[in-house]
Image: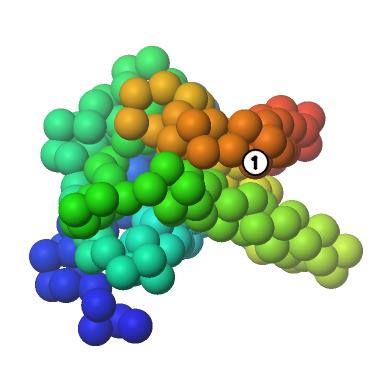
Amino acid sequence: MLERITRRERSDLLIAWIAISIAFSLIFIRGGVTLETFLVFLLISMVTVGIGFILHEMAHKFTAMRYGYWAEFRKDNLMLLVAVAMAALVGVVFAAPGATVIYGTYITREQNGKISAAGPAVNLVLCAVFAVLSGAAGLLSIPLLSLIGMVGLQVNAMIAAFNMLPVSVLDGKKVLAWNPAVFAVLIVTAFGILLASYFTPLF
């Protein structure tokens, strides 16, 4: 499986992973910034955002390849810069680090919808995984793991919710065109988890 990830794709994934981890770190530190605080949240973001972002893109890639198409992630340097700048200046993450490009002569609406749905669906599964981690760490009184769980839950809900918006080239538009019922389930679940996460403080 790993041999299907090219050297260029690995480089693009790594750069995008670091950039969006920095962007999310700037959001989570909320105000009083020390080098120690930033580094702690950068490491947490690299774990939580890294897992969510990479598995999201790999879900697109390998679902496309399941249908016989070649697919590779390509970073967008401008959008990576925008993500970090917006996080630093206005406290909002606009996470569009790039896209998984699918190479094929003809992709049906159903195939395109399923390929698009795979990414957000993986993030929603990760929401459940991180929620269990946070709950278990809370019961065992391990604050750092509990924090990682809550950040992972919130970040993956953000990624899923943003990508399910039915606009432009985002996943939601293609899922809606394929199956409105699947679209409704994914977007309601994503925004529901995201809103619920804000009622549970990260600190």
Residue found 32% across the figure and 36% down from its top: 96
Residue found 42% across the figure and 63% down from its top: 63
The residue lying toward the viewer, choosing from 47 and 117, is 117
Does residue 2 appear to the left or right of 121 in the view shown? left
Q: How many marks?
A: 1
Kindly identify the amino acid type of the residue bearing the numbered disc 1: Val
Q: Position of residue 170 (x, y in %)?
A: 39, 33
- From this view, report whether residue 57 is shown above or below residue 169: below
- From this view, report whether residue 188 is shown above or below residue 73: above
Q: Position of residue 64 (x, y in %)?
A: 36, 61
- From this view, report whether residue 151 is shown above or below residue 48: above
User: Alpha-carbon neighbours of circle 1 within 10 Å: few (<14), some, or many (≥20)?
Assistant: some
The residue lying toward the viewer, choosing from 95 and 121, is 121
The quarter of the displayed image where residue 197 is located: top right
- Residue 37 visible somewhere in the drawing: no
Residue found 62% across the figure and 32% down from its top: 180
Quarter in which the N terminus is drawn: bottom left
- Mark 1, residue position: 182
